[in-house]
Image (cartoon, helix red, strand yellow):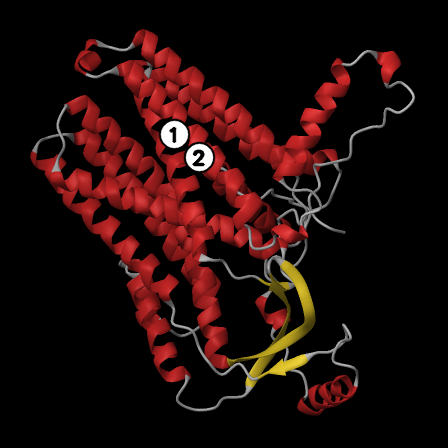
Amino acid sequence: MLENHFEKPREHDITEVVAQQSAANPSENGLIMVINHGKVHPPFSVLWATVLYCAEFICASVLSRTYQKSDDVVWMGLTITFMLVPSVLTQLTLTFVHRDLGRDRPFVLFMHLLQMGPIIRCIEALIVYCQGGKKEEPYVTISRKVKLKHGRGLGPAFECEIGHSERKLAVHRNAFKRTAVIQAFLGSSPQLTLQLYATIQEKYVLPTRLALMIISMISIVYGALVCSVLAIQIKYDDYKVRMKPTAYLCMILWRGLEIATRITTLVLFSTTFTVWVVLVGLTNLFIFFFQPWVEFWARKASLPENIEKNFSKLGTTVVLCMVTFLYACINIFCWSAVQLDLADHDLVEKQPRWRSLAVYYTLRFMENVTLIVLWYHFKSDFYEYVCTPLLVVQLIVCYSLAVLFMLIFHQFCHPCRRLFHYNVEDCLRCACCWKKKQLQPPENHAHGLHAPPDLTNHLID
């Protein structure tokens, strides 16, 4: 995919296009500005993902040693499992993205075998950044984007020259975005759930365990933010999208409250119904895993081609199963922000609908309330010194606040909210008006009744 977008155009072709467009009226939409993009941005996301990976790995190792000394074999085994499984998948992802198996790089592969691949990749990205701006280098490709102003696409499209250094950093950033999501929802989420459950069962808090829970929570929220930002970038690929600090703050509150409430609900329910919580988790996993496949089979579509040049149909199916498994794990804990389309080359539905978002949060809210109420009625005597009614109300209010911040983000903070065909306010107003019309007698509006507009598709054609 990446190689198809980095074909170097000839210099005289670009010069000719610029000369022709510059002679036109600057107010025309066909005007294209070519910008020499010489500035290379620091790889902060790569550095942050590496710090989270190392911090969680070290804390989990120290905590496993503590469990070993106290003969807590079950806690030790599960902690090591949730530490090593995402770590191995992270090494495989970095190796796959950078295509190191076909290159002579024994030291890098050895570092991956030692589970230190993110460290060496971060060092490579920092070296590329430090060497990037010292000398002028020829561009590899040209990226065309439409600039957004006040959330609306205005002005002509502009083209940016992308050099070798920026291309290498883009590969590193994309690779670490994938690893951040894998680390968050295949490692940090079950790790945080396990350690919170162990804390309640043992009735005391270890400093190392507390540190691991804090780091895991930060990792999960960061992975959810990466999912949301990637979803926006995929949906509005033709636009230059820039997130404001208020948007990030709203997203952090939305994701943090949603994830914290969900994990706390599952842990409290598991303290009373240990076996039933496994059934709840597996039910969620199977529903979200088979949902994209059922839609794929219902459309009678065929498998996408060219996901990877050397993949057979079996290899493509295995990759799609891994993607859907990660998608299901994300949706167990929070909204994934994307809908899978297994027939599409990019595997993502480009025009998501409000209906999926509304159905997810409605059913998830009902599920959380049901689990909390069941825990409240069948809780053990351990919670006699805790104000359990207040705890139940707090969990319900926190999840409601998460939904509220989600609506605020889409209504006021979304960078492309002006491109929505219908926004949150329109959907709520239309739903209320439609209910009022349904309550009126049929003879009052039989002649002027029209079907409500389709608010499920909120993107402009």
**Could you say where residue 358 lies in the image, as x and y percent from the top left?**
59, 31
| Quarter assignment of residue 370 | top left
Residue that mark 1 sits on: 398
**Kind of residue at disc 2:** Ala
**Left or right, residue 28 beside residue 355:** right
**Could you say where residue 317 lies in the image, as x and y percent from the top left?**
59, 45
Q: Name which residue lies at 54% across and 32% down.
A: 288
Q: How many marks?
A: 2
**Kind of residue at disc 1:** Cys
Crowd band around label 2 with a 10 angstrom C-alpha radius: few (<14), some (14–19), many (20+): many
Residue furthest left in the image: 69
Please, is residue 274 above or below residue 103 in the view?
above
**Could you say where residue 103 lies in the image, as x and y percent from the top left?**
44, 73
Q: Name which residue lies at 89% across and 18% down.
A: 446
Residue 12 visible in rendering:
yes
Residue that mark 2 sits on: 402
Please, is residue 129 above or below residue 199 in the view?
below
Labelled pair 2, 1 in contact (Cβ < 8 Å): yes
Secondary element at tag 1: helix
Please, is residue 365 above or below residue 355 in the view?
above
**Left or right, residue 187 beside residue 435:** left
Please, is residue 11 above or below residue 7 in the view?
below
Crowd band around label 1 with a 10 angstrom C-alpha radius: few (<14), some (14–19), many (20+): some
Residue 99 visible in rendering:
no
Pick the residue in front: 356 or 102: 356
Q: Name which residue lies at 25% across and 55% down.
A: 54
**Could you say where residue 99 lies in the image, as x and y percent from the top left?**
47, 66
